[in-house]
Amino acid sequence: MSDWQPAATPGTLRLRAQLNALIRAFFQDRHVLEVETPILSQAGNTDPNIASFVLEFSGRTDGAPRMRWLRTSPEFAMKRLLAAGIGDCYELGRVFRDGEAGGRHNPEFTMLEWYRVGWDHHRLMDEAVELVAAALELGGRAIPIVHKTTYREIYRQCLGVDVVHDPDNALRAALGDVQIDPAGLTRDDWLDLLMTHRIQPHLDAGTVTLVHGYPPSQSALARLTADDPPVAQRFELYLGPLELANGYHELTDPQEQRRRFQRDLDLRARRGDWQPPMDQHLLDALDAGLPDCAGVALGVDRLLMAMVGAARIDAALAFPFARA
């Protein structure tokens, strides 16, 4: 048995260290502050499509809750720092998601998240591309072609469906021979399946594809436009078929954020899923005043996969889940 040995090669592990140094130099040159936030939180992620690890603390709490959640992102804590006036900031650290394991997923992984005060998501897209291009160059890969498109347009071009007007049965039909149990699936679930099974696999390997303008139901923590119909000021960055980053022009309205958290919890209740507590600290920070900003989270392990041309995330990790 050789499970004690690292899955990644020594060369890949050294490249990871170089990538971490590149990331820190990238933001130091741009005067973006590195921060550290808690891994254990009093609140969980309400997103119906993300499962959190939960544990109970056995020591003294001084009245604080014993139940703690391993963070799925540093987002909420970083927004508290932004509301306190910290300014442009980033964090490079581990995050945790239950139930996510496979070729491109590991239950614990490294996330880079950063926020730019006074920026919108379009400006942040360009900076995200600059970072990805610098990382690929470090790994000896060519600078990619960049293609920007809207969410509505990529579905129309690739599948001939209109995500705004076409009924759910048209979305299901566009899956073709992909067999999925439809029980309990929402419209957003069908749209996600079309992206992961019919669109992503065919994205050009040498191209960064930036998709923006998501449906409001997929807005999470993003602002909505005043268009008719409105769209979320959100983007995702793909390198070929590999999803690398998800960014927003951030929502700053505490009442609207509470409504969205409750919408998530209502959907969780209908599915019979765990009900994590809302992050009241985040809502209080929004009430105090989150500055106009844009933020993005990038999967560092996936970026390293792209740098070394790996097909599975295990090749980018010293000790993946099965060897941890």
Image (cartoon, rainbow, N blue to C red):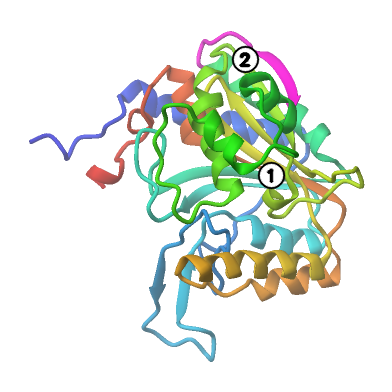
How crowded pointer 1 is (Cα within 10 Å; few <14, some 14-19, many 20+) is rated as many
Stretch in magenta: 139-150
The answer to whether residue 11 is magenta is no
Distance, label 1 to label 2, CA atoms, is: 23 Å
Element type at marker 2? strand
- Please state the horizontal and vertical placement of residue 24, each as a whole percent of the image: 62, 36
Q: Is residue 44 left or right of residue 291?
A: left
**In the drawing, what numbered circle is on residue 114?**
1
The residue that label 2 is drawn on is 207
Q: Amino acid at mark 1?
A: Trp
The answer to whether residue 149 is magenta is yes
Whether residue 299 can be seen here: no
Depth order, front residue of 237/79: 237
Q: Is residue 4 left or right of residue 224?
A: left
Element type at marker 1? strand
- Please state the horizontal and vertical placement of residue 69, each as a whole percent of the image: 48, 68
Whether residue 320 can be seen here: yes
Give the quarter of the figure containing the N terminus.
Answer: top left
Identify the residue at image location x=82%, y=33%.
122
Please, is residue 301 above or below residue 229 in the view? above
Please, is residue 57 above or below residue 87 in the view? below
Labels 1 & 2 near each other (Cβ < 8 A):
no
Identify the residue at image location x=90%, y=43%.
228
Q: Is residue 179 left or right of residue 223?
A: left
- Please state the horizontal and vertical placement of residue 124, each as a whole percent of the image: 77, 35
- Count up the numbered dots: 2
Identify the residue at image location x=40%, y=79%.
57
Residue lying farthest to the right in this orientation: 226
- Please state the horizontal and vertical placement of residue 137, each as a whole percent of the image: 58, 14
Q: Amino acid at mark 2?
A: Thr
Question: If you read the primary sequence from the N terminus, does the residue marked by circle 1 or circle 2 appear first?
Answer: 1
